[in-house]
Image: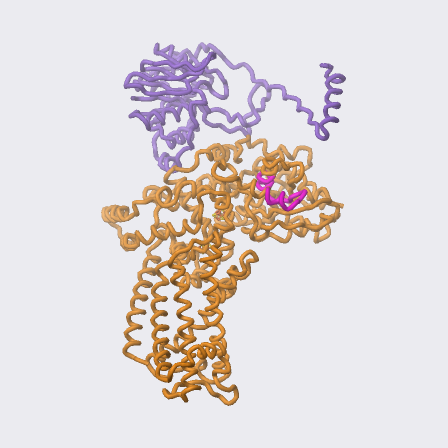
Chain colours: A orange, B purple
Amino acid sequence: MNPLLMSLLLIIGLGIFGRTMYYKIQLLLALGPVDPANRFNNIVERLKNLVILAIGQKRLVGRKREWIAGIMHAFIFWGFCVLLIRSISLYGEGFVKGFQLPIFGHDGLIGYLYIALKDIMEALVLFMAAYAIFRRAVLKPTRMHNTWEAYFVLVMIVVLMISDLMLDGARYNLITLFNNPDHLYFFNNPKFGSEFIWTPVSVGAASLIKGLSAETTSWVLTIMFWIHITTQLVFLNFLPLGKHFHVITALPNVFLKSLGYPHEKAAVLDLENEAAWEDETLGLNHIHQLNWKQGLDLYTCTECGRCKDVCPAYLTDKPLSLNEFNDDLKAELFNNSANVIKRANLAANLNGNGDAEDIEAIKTQMAELNSEKSLVGDIISEDTLWACTTCRACEQVCPVTIEHVPRIIALRQGQTLMAEAYPKELNVALKGLERNGNPWGIGYDKRADWAEGLDVKTMADDSDVDYLLWVGCAGSFDDRTKKVTTSLVKILQKANISFAILGTEEKCTGDFARKVGNEMLYQMMAEENIATLNNYKVKKIIAACPHCLNTLKHDYPQMGGNYEVIHHTEFIDQLVKSGKITLNKSFEGSLTYHDPCYLGRYNEIYDQPRSLLNSVAKDGLKELDRHGKESFCCGAGGGRMWMEETIGKRINNVRAQEIVDKKASTVAVSCPFCLTMIEDGMKELAQEENVKTQDIAELVANNMA
Amino acid sequence: MKILTTVKKVVDVELNIRVNDGAIVEDGLQYVINAWDENGVETAVQLKENNSAETTLVSIGGDDNADMIKKCYAMGIENGILIDDPALANADSSVFAKVLQKVYEKGEYDLIITGKQAQDTDNGQAGIMLAEYLNIPCVSNVVAIEVMDDSHVKVSRLGDAGTEIVELELPAVVTVSDSINEPRLPAMRGIMMAKKKKIETMDLSALGTSIDDLGGADLQSEVVEYMQPEARKSGQKFEGDAAEITAEVVGLLSNEAKVL
Ligand code: SF4
Ligand code: SF4
């Protein structure tokens, strides 16, 4: 069309874009003294995630609660994918009149199908963008915050669609009304007919300008072309500046997501490393300590607010709003970008430098480049940090697979290890853990008292058993949970399972210590437990608590403890399926189930508990509104069990109310913390007589044949 | 200001302590810092943080006390002295007080803080005896302390009739109650750093004394035998309808317990 102008626009547009991207990537690569886990392994699985989550937009269209917004976004995204091909051919047109891409630009079946698809997609994107504007301006969903940026981008999308449709409309008019004075190219294969039979939307657009003269129509075509190209380049350059960066980074971010465990596992910190203590590199204290994947997460956050919309802390008025959290970290990252890069260059000089004085000098320079702001206190508040229950609801819904919890735990490590600034109310539980291996601090020698008279062996008595029953602290010491343990033992004995317990040799797995950032105490617990388990050559463990399950199964292998770990609901379900236990459908009343976060979202155990409950309940199981993957936390995870909840509403009361509203007479749980929290919630609401809280093991034990 | 605190290692009273043939069964026992001494350490560290003070702790026992002393370092105590002498195995409060007296005389401290008693023996004597031997003032069961100037502190003690506020001229001994503060957990960075920190270990001769000097040959008190307290009978629990339960309880009280 005009090679000179086209070249100029491309050089400016792509040049600026390239420079921005170069800087953004450089910043990412400068992040982190510690790299995330390998993100380039298991390519097939990664591609599968890419197809399902990113291209398939699963978390957008697949959520019942918000499918309309999901469809809207998905069509805009798919539309853009389709239009990418069209854009390339338009760039070609800028240089060479009548430029056509191979295959897509040829009048074969694929060419025709493509233009038809492009035509429909442009209409759909236009419609969806219009709806998006309407939604923002009129419907105003609470989770979103409206910014001019969002409107600007939507308007650009509208302009892009209209300009391209009008361009084709003008072309149609020139060809059909004016006998194609400019000799424009169009498909006209006798087999498939004229191109325009396939593009009803463009033809519709043409009818809007059919009164114009040939010359004016020709002008319209030219103007629309340049508007389209310019808008596209402005759009491209606008993306990296704000939340729309996700248009570029979402696909790589999903491709590079954590595999095997829902998020990056906490690294086993080397606490013996004196330099780490001196350089304050344990935990996350300053922005440069984020790893590159966490940086990419920040680039990718779309600020959609889906995360906070399901966050128990946010929904009960705690000052934890995840998209703001992301935004604040991102601002701190960009404010320090030059220093972060300089610092990383200095760090590179450290490697291989043997001179002690040099090293000291470099380290001093590096320390000077640290942000003056500490992440906790200056960027996000203490109350924000400690409000999180690590329930993962946020991560489960995030359409672009951003990981919040590992970051929160790393920040807590920084607070606990370096700053000594953790909630002091945790001291009692931490001290109890240190001295007696349980957060209540009850004498460790009373750990197996619950088993008195139940004919339960300890490993010390006889370690030649098939299973170790891991009882957990609550199951050992808490009076209410001891009843659950007793029921579980009854089931195992009924099924003739060969099992033993560790008795007084068992200690807290250290889950809560790790979640509050006390890596030292966690490692102490883990080391002692692993030594005991390995000493008895334990292979298979039945865990009666999802937190124990998760720690034994996913954290202990990092420290040399490798076992096959199974939750009691999974195990009982196997017993039922294999006929070792027969259940009666004898439970009367309306039964519902509360999914524990560490069983569901962390370990994907959703079906087995349901299968058991359906087998005992006469009227079947009635689901809560928020269940399965979107279950609402009880409020106890992440060490919150051992802290007061003084801000806002109480999470457990909110959940209990939801259960009451469902008119359930019994709520089943499968976690001792959920049991305590929900039962307490029922008491608080004076509903404990109307709604009983029971562990699945109790329901099974009471309804066995 | 120089502060001396004393810490004793005691058996963890959360555990079931079993007795066999008049002696405590050591198997399965674990030892922890005496809770009141931990309050004393916290008091010393807080005084150090809020005023300019130097903190030293002294402990009497074997080298297995080192762990506990290092944890106190991690809480913020600067110097540690361990008096390790087998001759002290059967010592009583009076002997301990005399050992502490020697330590005091070596270091010239301004304020001595002890826990008001030890969780194992519950004697509550060492601190008070120490003040007596040194002939300096002593306030026990202290719940608050405030430095007035270099040579005076103001303390609150919980007495029978209420809180008494006492101004003390230094040097002096205070024995603290557990309600004076909530001891911090040892700082983790401190635990790492404390690994390398030295403990000044001395036996009695290094302290310039001997067990005879301290009255060890003629103990004023001696443990003759340990006995297990009788286990309390477990109570009876009633569940069900309130009216039925009431009738049942009344029946039991009048027929079995014969109190009605
Ligand atoms: S973290 Fe994910 S869910 Fe939350 S605002 Fe960002 S993109 Fe949306
Ligand atoms: S893990 Fe749960 S509590 Fe924590 S931020 Fe995410 S949704 Fe909120």
The residue sitting at 32% across, 60% down in the picture is A26
Q: Position of residue B212 (x, y in %)?
A: 40, 12
Question: Is B218 located above or below residue A90 in the figure?
Answer: above
Question: Is A454 located above or below residue B177 in the figure?
Answer: below
- Give the left or right position of residue A345, taking residue A44 as reference: left
Q: Position of residue A608 (x, y in %)?
A: 64, 52
Residue A46 visible? The answer is no
Asked whether residue A686 is drawn in magenta, I would say: no
- Give the left or right position of residue A415, taking residue A505 as reference: left
Front residue (pair A624, B26): A624
Residue A698 visible? The answer is yes
Quadrant placement of the N terminus of chain B: top left
Quadrant placement of the C terminus of chain B: top right
The residue sitting at 55% across, 56% down in the picture is A65
User: What is the magenta range?
Assistant: A657-678
Front residue (pair A334, B134): A334
